[in-house]
Image (cartoon, coloured by chain):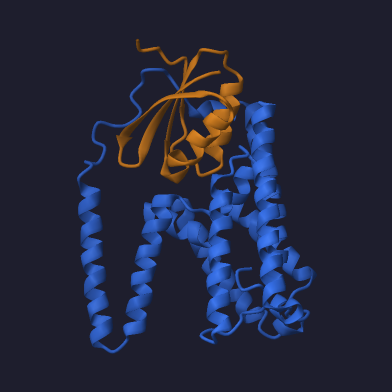
Chain colours: A orange, B blue
Amino acid sequence: MMEKASAVLDLRGELCPYPALYAGARLKRMTSGEILEVVADGLCAMEGLPDAISQAGHKLLKVETLANGIYRYTIEVA
Amino acid sequence: MSGLSLSGFVIFFGLAGGAATGVFLARWRLRREIRSGAVGMYERKPGEAIIEAKARPRWRQPVIALVVALVALAVLEIFVTQGETNLGIFMLFGLVFGFILQRSGFCMTASFRDLFTTGGGRLARGVIVAIAVAMLGFSILVATGLKQPFVLPVGWHTLVGGWLFGLGMVVAGGCATGTLFRVGEGSVQMMFALLGAILGASLFSVLLKTVEFKMGKGIWLVDSLGWQGALWVGFAFLGVWFLIVQWNEMRRKKLR
């Protein structure tokens, strides 16, 4: 059961805290059950983003490695 | 702060205030970009390929790391044979330190900044543990006479300096160590931040050489409170900070 993403954010190159802030702002404009995909790189992706997502109460469905240090997060809006 | 110098505690407050200001600026940028629609530049169509098929192969990085490690060992060997064993040991510590920092994501900047963005306290707790360990270790070294206490003059300028550093580290994206390991990760933005840090530190160390010790007196807590009192104050400070971090995390969770 692969849900289709309703929005994709490419936040590569953005340093902390921006990936978390941008993703958070986008998630606020989405409705419950929708899927957001976020592509990010660097430490913020590894640490800050999952933290921010879980702190905000959303569900991190999966994390994929697209290339070295570049990750894709699939988030279900709470 | 781990040296139980009063200035360290004052800087800590400055850092927190500066980080709060930095986060305020970041949120301001975000609000402005939402209003102007500039955030749209991050949007991609669902299903659109984001990474080019030619993305670098994954095996390359471990090989580069191995080569760097071997070169470091060779340099260490040169240091030791030249009688500069200390330099070699410093380098070895630096290597290990950098590895641990990167892998753990240990970041002073985030430890303050996350309190105001997500409320997450993981790194803040890490910093508390680090300072506690350093405080104990430093006390043992100083008490046994292996090291001189390092006490900086304290005054209003300490707070202003801490605030500036706190603001700067949030805007730049990393404090001293955070900047270094992000440069190692290949972040170009942080290379500029590092350049700025080197320039700033060099310029100001020359500029301030003459006035540095006219700015207030150094207060070493051990002088004024004794070892027991100073360590109590140090750990009580960390304890209170820990409670604030925990409370902040709970509060943000309830707010959502």
Does A47 sit above or below residue B220?
A: above
B87 left or right of B82 in image: right
Seen as rendered, the residue at the extreme top is A1
Does A66 sit above or below residue B220?
A: above
Residue toward you, B121 or B47: B121
Q: Quadrant of residue A8?
A: top left
Does B88 sit above or below residue B41?
A: below
Instruction: Give the quarter of the figure containing the N terminus of chain B.
Output: bottom right
- Total residue callouts: 0
For image coordinates 71% across by 49% down, the residue present is B21
Residue toward you, A25 or B2: B2
Residue toward you, B51 or B17: B17
Residue toward you, B200 or B115: B115
Q: Is residue B171 visible?
A: no
A75 left or right of B186 in image: right
For image coordinates 67% across by 55% down, the residue present is B239
Seen as rendered, the residue at the extreme front is B228
For image coordinates 69% across by 41% down, the residue present is B247
Q: Position of residue B160 (x, y in %)?
A: 74, 64
Q: Is residue B44 visible?
A: yes
Q: Position of residue A48 (x, y in %)?
A: 51, 40
For image coordinates 39% across by 68% down, the residue present is B94
Does B76 sit above or below residue B183?
A: below
B127 left or right of B153 in image: left
